């Protein structure tokens, strides 16, 4: 029975339908990051929009057919999450040992993140964006037994993932994720460069949020925890903060473009 279940999961994982949903999910991720990056750019230029996924959802829903687009985003996030969870269960067959285990863990975590994105988008559609802030959610977690440790560990994990993404980007490991024979010759170098900038940008954002969570746990002060919006504002207040924020925004937009590249050319 176990073998039959695994074989069925492998067949589903390799199916055209799942691959199609996965590519749609990459495009959905790209759209979300593009809107977040553009909102952050508008703030850099003097606007006051909220520069996080919640702000991005509000920006999308205010446009014509915005609710329809959000429903499509939910479908994309769910499809991508399903592909990643299946990858964690039966994927990475061409790898061995620790590399295979590490990539399966990453696939599982990525899948859960996009399940959470789908759930939050559905919540937004059903009830509108909540006003609950990252600090208050962190306070609730830290109030339970072991919560402070959990928050600290989550922060450190986010920092570690950010560092790993940056290292992999510098080493251009992301090239191996593409079906390079399908990428037009004139686009191969630009796509790799966009991937480098985008993965570094995403890595920096994760590490930034993770550092604030770890700081909140260390100081036993939930107010130190910040979501993306507050983290970018804190960054802007630092020495050379505007320049760093501009680089971060460029990284976000590059990551959105890289997501679109993966939607078209990712090896699945």
Image: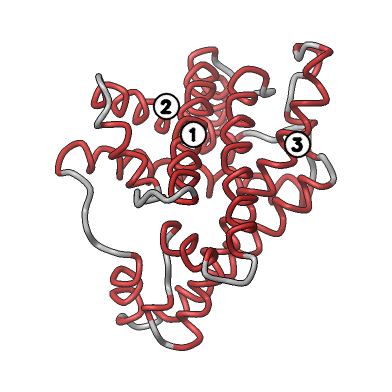
Depth order, front residue of 158/241: 241
- Label 2: state its secondary structure: helix
- Label 1: state its secondary structure: helix
The numbered mark at residue 174 is 3
The structure residue drawn at horizontal position 73% and vertical position 45%, both measured from the top left corner, is 100
Q: Nearer the viewer, mark 2 or mark 1?
A: 1
Question: Which residue matches tag 1?
Answer: 29
The earlier-in-sequence mark between 3 and 2 is 2
- Whole-percent x and y of residue 28? 45, 28
Question: Which residue matches tag 2?
Answer: 76
Mark-to-mark CA distance, 3 and 2? 22 Å
The earlier-in-sequence mark between 2 and 1 is 1
* Residue 239 relative to residue 5: left or right: right
Looking at this rendering, what residue extends furthest in the front direction?
A: 46
* Residue 185 relative to residue 25: left or right: right
**Could you tell me if the residues under marks 3 and 2 are in contact, i.e. CB atoms within 8 Å?**
no
């Amino acid at each position: 029975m176990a073998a039959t279940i695994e074989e069925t999961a492998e067949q589903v994982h390799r199916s055209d339908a799942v691959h199609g949903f996965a590519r749609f999910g990459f495009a959905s991720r790209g759209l979300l990051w593009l809107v977040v990056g553009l909102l952050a750019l508008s703030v850099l230029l003097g606007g006051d929009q909220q520069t996080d996924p919640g702000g991005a959802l509000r920006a999308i829903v205010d446009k014509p057919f915005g609710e329809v687009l959000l429903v499509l985003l939910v479908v994309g996030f769910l499809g991508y999450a399903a592909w990643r969870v299946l990858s964690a269960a039966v994927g990475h067959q061409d790898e061995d040992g620790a590399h295979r285990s590490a990539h399966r863990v990453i696939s599982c975590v990525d899948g859960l993140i996009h399940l959470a994105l789908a759930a939050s988008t559905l919540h937004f559609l059903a009830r509108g964006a909540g006003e609950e802030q990252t600090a208050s959610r962190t306070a609730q977690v830290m109030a339970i037994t072991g919560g402070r440790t959990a928050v600290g560990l989550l922060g450190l994990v986010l920092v570690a993932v950010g560092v790993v993404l940056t290292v992999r980007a510098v080493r251009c490991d992301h090239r191996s994720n593409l079906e390079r024979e399908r990428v037009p010759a004139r686009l191969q170098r630009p796509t790799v460069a966009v991937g480098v900038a985008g993965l570094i940008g995403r890595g920096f954002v994760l590490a930034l949020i993770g550092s604030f969570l770890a700081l909140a746990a260390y100081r036993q002060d939930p107010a130190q925890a910040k979501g993306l919006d507050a983290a970018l504002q804190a960054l802007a207040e630092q020495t050379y903060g505007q320049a760093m924020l501009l680089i971060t925004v460029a990284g976000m937009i590059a990551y959105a473009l890289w997501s679109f590249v993966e939607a078209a050319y990712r090896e699945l």
